[in-house]
Image (cartoon, rainbow, N blue to C red):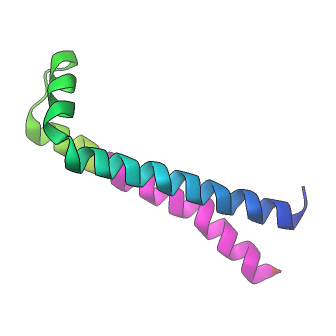
């Protein structure tokens, strides 16, 4: 795989993953109560725990996106 192809793959991966991240955030921000009711039927979970799990997941996912797609893309751009 050439460096140009790898750069393109990393950039598209970043864009798609960030889109998923924004979708998750918008879904939690706009449909919090219906999503909580669905999850509460499956698991015994409080609203605070539901929020903590979602916001923790969003934070972890964002950090992974940055470290595994954006940082390598920037490094490749700086190196070539």
The residue at the point 13 percent across, 28 percent down is 45
69 vs 37, left or right, is: right
Q: Position of residue 31 (x, y in %)?
A: 21, 41
Q: Quadrant of the N terminus?
A: bottom right
The residue at the point 52 percent across, 63 percent down is 66
| Span highlighted in magenta in the image | 57-79
Hey, which quadrant is residue 32 in on the image?
A: top left
Q: Quadrant of the C terminus?
A: bottom right
Q: Would residue 67 be visible to someone looking at this image?
A: yes
Q: Position of residue 51 (x, y in %)?
A: 18, 44
Above or below, 62 relative to 4: above
Instruction: Verify whether residue 76 appears in magenta.
Output: yes
Hey, which quadrant is residue 62 in on the image?
A: bottom left
Q: Position of residue 24 (x, y in %)?
A: 36, 46
43 vs 73, left or right, is: left
Residue projecting furthest to the right: 2
The residue at the point 61 percent across, 69 percent down is 71
Above or below, 77 relative to 2: below
- Our reading of the magenta stretch's main secondary structure is helix
74 vs 23, left or right, is: right
The residue at the point 21 percent across, 47 percent down is 30
Above or below, 31 relative to 5: above
Q: Position of residue 35 (x, y in %)?
A: 21, 32
Residue projecting furthest to the front: 30
Q: Would residue 56 be visible to someone looking at this image?
A: no
41 vs 4, left or right, is: left
């Amino acid at each position: 795989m050439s460096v140009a192809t790898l750069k393109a793959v990393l950039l598209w991966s970043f864009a798609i993953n960030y889109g998923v991240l924004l979708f998750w955030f918008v879904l939690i921000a706009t449909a919090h109560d219906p999503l909580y009711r669905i999850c509460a039927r499956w698991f015994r979970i409080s609203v605070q725990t539901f929020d903590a799990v979602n916001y923790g997941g969003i934070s972890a996912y964002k950090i992974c996106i940055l470290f595994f797609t954006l940082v390598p893309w920037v490094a490749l751009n700086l190196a070539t």
